[in-house]
């Protein structure tokens, strides 16, 4: 299957919201991380990231990351693209304490506070994507 | 297949027979993106609603068919957003003519759109010298105006905003008096919060006026440095830590306020870039100018340019905000057949103003209550302030030495109406800084 980061961002976000509203915090938290990663990768393509057309995935190894590395990597693309100035993320990385391996952890580890901070981070990415769609850059 | 100029007429044609359907949808947004592709944006509450699904589907299909390359496939043509106000925020938008609830949002790659007219700035008067074409004596005339205002006791600050072709500084300052930095340096340093480093050394006092003061802020300093690399960053907006955005013209406006506080000028003379250009737009629409002098030579290029601008102001509904600040200047009136040339210029100017900027006076009513002028009305904004061509003032590079032995009678003969007009804009009373 070929990567479609915009669609993946939207479905992860939508499903995370459904789980969050049903108080299924552990899996909501996981999907917020995936939504942020996919959304930022889609924006990075608009800002010049090279992708392999046969897979839709980034060519550069450094561009293959999870949500907890996404904030800084995104910034390096954004600052090199003059329209990127309008696509600023909140300054503090909300995913510093998120890790893909947490999907193996027990659900009692996932507090509402933790899920809300990741929800806010993914929500900020969601807003940038909305703007990018309206401006026609993705 | 339609092209850009047919987008709005095509949308008009699609929507006109569907007015009943539109009523069910409330406000709708036509979003014309950076590439000139159009999407419909509707309120999220309409998503998946049975009563409106048919109407939306019908509009979307027709728009998608009609717009071709300037639209999207029907299944991607519509976006649902929780707040249309949020979608409009910070964008240029206007009502589609003929519809009360259809808003067109235009997303431009450049920051300035010529259609947000700042109110007249309080404090020192700001007078902008603009032309569609370069090389018409605009910078020379602004130097003369500055000199004359200073001779009458005003403190005058001249800003060279012709950043891509700087020049006025050379007419007012000999090379050795030029400051270390210029406007470009400040705009670049400001991006990294370092404007204070250049602020004290970007203004020089001209030695041409004995009774008043002329301060000159050049486009670049004595040594232009890496000018091209700096110019390419001048247009950057600045985003602070909280994410609030300051466009480059807002930054420029902040610079003017800081200069005003530091140097206390009575008037700013702003030499703008020529043409329908980003800097010119900032000068004319964003800085709160009290007067905008439109330098003109008679010819197709001039009138085509002014017609484009005037029509844009008309279409975006801002004519009333700008028209009373405009004044046409007839540049380089030739020595031979000058009177005939002037008549032709006046006629063309009147046609351009009357078509887009002047009110239409209904039959039987007095023109006095309307913003409307006869072609021969000397007080009308279209009536050119004439500047006679003169070989002594034609070459800008020699002008500093030219000014040093200035003959007031000669100057009045050439620039008299302009000088009088500029004095009238500034006003003679109550605006002095002591």
Image: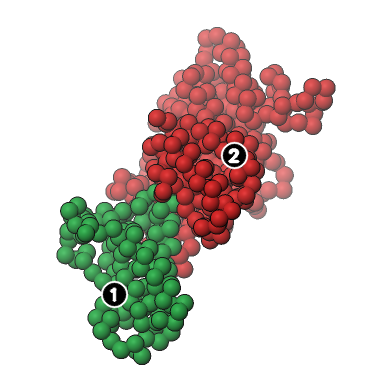
Chain colours: A green, B red
Residue drawn at (43%, 77%), measured in percent from left and top?
Answer: A20
Mark 1, Cα crowd under 10 Å, few <14 / some 14-19 / many 20+, is some
Q: In the structure shown, which secondary structural element does the residue marked by tag 1 occupy? A: helix
Residue picked out by circle 1: A68
Mark 2, Cα crowd under 10 Å, few <14 / some 14-19 / many 20+, is few
Badges 1 and 2, same chain: no
B315 relative position to A49: left or right: right
Residue B18 - label:
2
Residue B286 image position (x, y, % from top left): 55, 46
Say which of B275 and A79 sits in front: A79
Say which of B194 and B9 sits in front: B9
Q: In the structure shown, which secondary structural element does the residue marked by tag 2 occupy? A: helix
Any part of residue A104 in sight:
yes
Residue B384 image position (x, y, % from top left): 61, 24
Residue B71 image position (x, y, % from top left): 42, 41
**What is the CA distance from the residue labelled 1 to the residue labelled 2?**
49 Å
Residue B246 image position (x, y, % from top left): 48, 57
Position of residue B159 relative to residue A52, above or below, is: above
Residue drawn at (44%, 52%), measured in percent from left and top?
Answer: A134
Position of residue B77 relative to residue B328, above or below, is: below
Residue drawn at (68%, 29%), measured in percent from left and top?
Answer: B358
Discs 1/2, front? 2
Any part of residue B178 in sight:
no
Position of residue A123 relative to residue A116, above or below, is: above
- Chain under disc 2: B
């Amino acid at each position: 299957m070929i990567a479609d980061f915009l669609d993946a961002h939207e479905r992860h976000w939508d499903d995370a919201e459904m789980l969050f509203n049903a108080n299924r915090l552990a899996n909501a938290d996981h999907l917020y991380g995936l939504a942020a990663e996919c959304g930022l990768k889609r924006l990075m393509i608009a800002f010049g990231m090279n992708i392999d057309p046969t897979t839709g995935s980034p060519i550069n190894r450094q561009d293959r990351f999870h949500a907890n590395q996404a904030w800084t990597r995104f910034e390096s693309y954004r600052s090199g693209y003059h329209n990127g100035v309008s696509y600023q993320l909140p300054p503090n990385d909300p995913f510093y304490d998120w890790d893909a391996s947490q999907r193996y952890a027990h659900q009692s580890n996932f507090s509402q506070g933790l899920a809300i901070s990741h929800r806010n981070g993914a929500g900020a990415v969601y807003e940038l994507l909305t703007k990018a769609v309206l401006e026609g850059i993705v | 297949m339609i092209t850009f100029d047919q987008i709005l007429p095509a949308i008009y044609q699609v929507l006109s027979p569907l007015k009943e359907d539109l009523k069910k949808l409330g406000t709708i947004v036509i979003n014309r993106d950076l590439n000139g592709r159009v999407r419909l944006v509707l309120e999220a509450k309409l998503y998946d609603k049975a009563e409106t699904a048919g109407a939306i589907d019908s509009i979307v299909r027709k728009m998608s068919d009609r717009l071709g390359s300037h639209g999207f496939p029907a299944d991607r043509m519509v976006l649902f957003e929780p707040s249309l106000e949020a979608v409009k925020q910070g964008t240029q938008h206007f009502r589609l003519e003929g519809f009360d609830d259809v808003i067109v949002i235009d997303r431009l790659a450049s920051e300035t759109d010529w259609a947000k007219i700042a109110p007249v700035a309080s404090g020192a008067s700001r007078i902008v010298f603009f032309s569609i074409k370069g090389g018409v004596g605009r910078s020379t005339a602004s130097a003369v105006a500055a000199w004359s205002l200073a001779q009458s006791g005003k403190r005058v600050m001249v800003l060279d905003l012709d950043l891509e072709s700087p020049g006025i500084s050379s007419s007012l300052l000999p090379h050795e008096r030029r400051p270390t930095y210029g406007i470009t340096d400040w705009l670049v340093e400001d991006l990294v919060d370092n404007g204070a480093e250049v602020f004290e050394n970007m203004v020089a006092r001209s030695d041409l006026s004995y009774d008043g003061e002329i301060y000159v802020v050049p486009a670049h300093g004595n040594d232009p440095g890496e000018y091209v690399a700096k110019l390419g960053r001048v247009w950057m907006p600045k985003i602070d830590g909280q994410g609030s955005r300051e466009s480059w013209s807002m930054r420029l406006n902040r610079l003017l306020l800081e200069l005003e506080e530091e140097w206390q000028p009575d008037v700013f003379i702003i030499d703008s870039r020529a043409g329908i250009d980003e800097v010119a737009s900032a000068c004319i629409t964003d800085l709160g100018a009290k007067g905008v002098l439109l330098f003109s030579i008679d010819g197709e290029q001039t009138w085509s340019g002014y017609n484009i601008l005037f029509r844009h102001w008309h279409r975006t509904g801002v004519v009333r905000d700008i028209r009373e600040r405009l004044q046409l200047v007839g540049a380089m009136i030739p020595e031979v057949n000058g009177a005939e040339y002037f008549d032709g210029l006046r006629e063309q100017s009147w046609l351009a103003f009357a078509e887009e900027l002047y009110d239409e006076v209904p039959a039987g009513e007095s023109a006095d209550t309307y913003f409307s002028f006869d072609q021969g009305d000397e007080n009308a904004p279209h009536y050119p302030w004439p500047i006679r061509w003169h070989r002594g003032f034609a070459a800008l590079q020699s002008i500093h030495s030219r000014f040093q032995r200035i003959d007031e009678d000669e100057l009045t003969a050439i620039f008299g109406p302009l000088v009088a007009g500029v004095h009238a804009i500034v006003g003679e009373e109550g605006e002095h800084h002591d």
